[in-house]
Amino acid sequence: MEPQSAWCRLKRNQKLMNNLVKGIALSALLMLGTAHAKQLNVYAWGGYLPEASLRQFEKQQGVTVNYSTFENNESMYTKLKLLKGGGYDVVFASAYFIEKMGREGLLAELDLEQIPNMKDTMPALLGQAHDPQNRYSLPYIWGVTGLSYNAEMVDGVTRWADLWKPEFAGQVMLIDDIRDVFGMALKLNGYSINSQNPQQIEKAYESLKALQANVLLYNSDAPHVPYVSGEASVGMQWNGNAYQGQQEMPELKFVMPQEGAVLWMDNFVIPSGSENKALAHQFINFMYQPESQAEIVNSLGYASATTRGRALLNDAIRNDVTIFPSEADMVKGEFINDVGPEALAIYEKYWQKLRNQ
């Protein structure tokens, strides 16, 4: 019986060895597949993309979306500059940074034939001064920087100038964005938010310096949260974040200031160093589907770029004036555009002085 037992042990060991080899080979294949799986690297503000849309795109394309966040346009630009346009495949940039980034070679030209769903884009959002031929960018969302206040703590505000009232000492929140803040101060003084005049920019700075006693904090990561938490009672706000805050706190109001709101548009761009430009185009095209456009509004509270997307919304959201301000209020506002490197340097000089006080 001993020779047979030895034979059985030998066969059993061979079987175990074969299974082990197969297991190692399978693990190697899985690791190789994971290493070569398609990945899309996205760079945007936090909470800025609908999670449902991201998961659907991943499933549809068999890819992984790596979503990295930044706090403001300046930090996004600095990162891309350091990476020489590499590291990411789709980036979201406000309009006033696009001309600068394109001029510096940080952006790839878009192939609009690969983005057929963009044909439904609202005409007023295309051909803007920052990218007249839409060579580098397409609109993602657009919105308004206006006033917000907690109606249980504040009687009401209607003008930018109200933020300077002494009773708001230590209660005001400002958006952590140079052009939003200076846009407010320029409007307050009767100037264009795109002023390139050094004297006008300096006057705006002097107004903001006088406001500092009232300023509690600057925030652009989730600017509705300080209101909802009771930390701030009044200040600046993006309309979409105001809408998000109102879902938790109905007494949070959003107001289009009488002097005129700051209007802005955020855009899809593809960095020049992207290694997945075809996939980046597919992602943008996916986000232009009517269902994706409706999801942007439903989940984020910001106005999307197409008409068919808005048509899918329920009446309450489609007619919400926080998300979609009236034409009369929009006319008084002004879109942020690029002011050129010389004027931007002046803005940045005064911004640093303001923030270092």
Image (cartoon, rainbow, N blue to C red):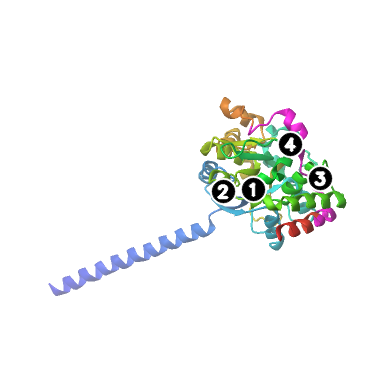
First in sequence, mark 3 or 4: give its number. 4
* Marker disc for residue 229: none
Location of mark 1 (residue): 173
First in sequence, mark 1 or 2: give its number. 1
Position in image of residue 12 (x %, y %): 25, 67
Distance between mark 1 and mark 4 Cα atoms:
29 Å
Position in image of residue 317 (x %, y %): 58, 30
Distance between mark 2 and mark 4 Cα atoms:
35 Å
The question of residue 120 being in magenta is answered with no
First in sequence, mark 2 or 3: give its number. 3
Q: Which residues are magenta?
A: 322-346
Tell me the amino acid under the disc marked 2: Glu
Label 1: few (<14), some (14–19) or many (≥20) C-alpha neighbours in 10 Å? many
The residue lying toward the viewer, choosing from 16 and 295, is: 295
Q: Quadrant of the C terminus?
A: bottom right
* Marker disc for residue 125: 4
Position in image of residue 79 (x %, y %): 68, 60
Location of mark 2 (residue): 231
Tell me the amino acid under the disc marked 1: Met
**Which is in the foreground here, disc 3 or disc 1?**
1
First in sequence, mark 2 or 4: give its number. 4
Tell me the amino acid under the disc marked 3: Asn
**Which is in the foreground here, disc 2 or disc 3?**
2
* CB contact under 8 Å: marks 1 and 2: yes
* Marker disc for residue 194: 3
Label 4: few (<14), some (14–19) or many (≥20) C-alpha neighbours in 10 Å? some
Label 2: few (<14), some (14–19) or many (≥20) C-alpha neighbours in 10 Å? some
